[in-house]
Amino acid sequence: MSLDPTYKDLNRASTERIKKLASSLTDEEMQTRVGEHWTVSIALAHLAFWDRRVIYLLDETVKGGKLFAHEIDVVVNDISLPLWAAIPPREAARIAVETSEELDQRLEEYPQDLLEEIFNYNKRWVVRALHRNEHLDEVDAALKR
């Protein structure tokens, strides 16, 4: 499957959503529950973590000249939860914004042949908007309650 270049626009739009959310919420709103165990700030820390995971994947792929697809078990979310909860809400927001911006730029400048290989293995590693918007939609719904 060929990578549609609109992934850049989708990623930028999701980063703008993160920025808007991070700059508009009060400290109290950052502590709004999103599901059973998460808060808005935990959702932002989660997004930063997984964007950083993709940055690591990009670095290792370019180093080796081929796809580096080391799988991380889903249990990582559960293991990381106490760490993400300990991050002050504003810091979680700052890290989410900075990481998404860095990753968007890296993806846009990445070697096309390697990016296609990564995309064909897991499109969510390239079209970060898929993962980001899933959680941002949950945050929006929680804030409306």
Image (cartoon, grey):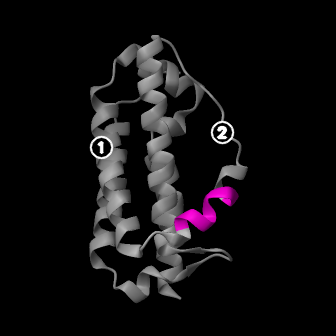
Pointer 1: residues within 10 angstroms few (<14), some, or many (20+)? some
Q: Which residue is mark 1?
A: 102
- Is 80 colored magenta in this rendering? yes
- Amino acid beneath label 2: Ile
Q: Which residue is mark 2?
A: 72
- Amino acid beneath label 1: Glu
State the SS at label 2: loop
Image: 121 above or below 127: above
Image: 132 above or below 40: above
> Residue 69 placed where, x, y %?
60, 25
If you read the primary sequence from the N terminus, does the residue marked by circle 1 or circle 2 appear first? 2
The answer to whether residue 3 is seen in the rendering is no
Quote the CA–CA distance across marks 1 and 2.
21 Å
State the SS at label 1: helix
- Is 45 colored magenta in this rendering? no
Toward the viewer: 110 or 1?
110
Toward the viewer: 136 or 89?
89
At a point 36% along the width and 67% down the height, the residue shown is 91
Where are the magenta residues, as a range?
Answer: 78-84
Image: 144 above or below 76: below
> Residue 23 placed where, x, y %?
27, 73
**Residue 102 found in image quarter:** top left
The answer to whether residue 62 is seen in the rendering is yes
Q: Main secondary structure of the magenta part?
A: helix
At a point 47% along the width and 37% down the height, the residue shown is 54
Labelled pair 1, 2 in contact (Cβ < 8 Å):
no
Toward the viewer: 80 or 106?
80
> Residue 29 placed where, x, y %?
42, 85
At a point 42% along the width and 74% down the height, the residue shown is 88
At a point 51% along the width and 47% down the height, the residue shown is 50
